[in-house]
Image: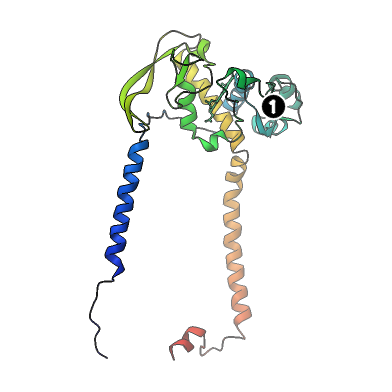
Amino acid sequence: MSQRKFRWPVHGPALMLFALLAMLWASVCSAGTQTTSPPLMHVTVNLSDISALRSGALYFAHRCEACHSIQGARLQELAKPLNLSRKDIEKYLDVSKSGYLSTIQSSLPTGLAKKFLNKTEPPDLTVIAKRRSPDWLYTYLNSFYIDPSRATGVNNVVFYNVSMPDVFATLQGLQKPVMKPGYRFGEKTKIAMGVAPLTKGVMTSGQFHAMTKDIVTFLYLVAHPHQQEREKIGGWVLIALAILSVITFLLYKLYWKNVIPPEGGRWWQYWKR
Ligand code: HEC
């Protein structure tokens, strides 16, 4: 057989050029929307910390439920992870009096918030801990700062022009932004990269951080209601699958014993001939 000469594939360079142009175009596009993102604070969520879950649920009921619902979770479902009786849940957590079997409902009439909060309806927070990371939520709750240009008087480091008012003003005190030069949608401007305390609140910063951590832990629980169960049964499922693999392998050997002759004759051996 004569040896074939190596030839460059015709499409290779053209494809490479196309990829290069696409990359260049993507970078031009992203330069137009480039926004400097402030650093996130870090939080470690521990779902087996029952006291954190309880206090998070309590803070949610009294500080957030006025505006936000959690329609994907029923009060009844909180009994097990929070280790609370029905009576306790009805007494401490059912602030909107919608009932033990009902979902967590804000008593805010639909449409009313739109009137006051910059035409924005407070979103349902069932899956917020999936859409945003715990770190993001923690930073968000800690990063409201005064901004006289806003109708609510505040803005947020990780949520520019947020419509939510600063519900922590009395607890945390007011904060001022730490502005640094950066980009917003490609435009050079000053960006709030963090906050600095301005006035004192009734909580110390340690207490405040603990409270926001508890709220994030609670929001994480409602977004991942079966996580603890999954972690518990995960190991057993893997063991069951391993046992099943052995059984199926032995069955395979048994079934094929009469089909495959001992001298061979599998399809790939015929293929070679
Ligand atoms: C006075 C009503 C009000 C209260 C009380 C309130 N919020 Fe909000 N919240 C809003 C509104 C309105 C938005 C929508 C902001 C936007 O889209 O600009 C919002 C947005 C949010 C978001 C961001 C959602 C997203 O799209 O990423 C989170 C998280 C959140 N709130 C958590 C909380 C928590 C936790 C509490 C309790 C400590 C709380 N909120 C209390 C009105 C409220």
Q: What residue is disc 1 on? A: 105
Image quarter for ligand 1: top right
Quarter-of-image position of residue 78:
top right
Q: Give the position of the N terminus as an image quadrant.
A: bottom left
In percent of width and height, residue 221 lies at: 59, 34
Q: Is residue 30 above or below residue 9?
A: above
Left or right: 148 in relation to 233: left
In the image shown, does 228 or 174 lie closer to the viewer?
A: 174
Q: Specify the quadrant of the image occupied by residue 116.
A: top right
Q: Quadrant of the C terminus?
A: bottom left
Circle 1: element type = loop
Q: Is residue 47 visible?
A: no
Coordinates of residue 241 in the picture (x, y in percent): 59, 60
Q: Residue drawn 24% across and 89% down? A: 2
Can residue 208 be seen at all in this image of the molecule? Answer: yes
Q: Is residue 267 above or below residue 33?
A: below
Foreground of the two, 55 or 30: 30
Mark 1 nearby-residue class (10 Å; few <14, some 14–19, many ≥20): many
- Give the left or right position of residue 156, taking residue 237 as reference: left
Which amino acid is tagged 1?
Gln
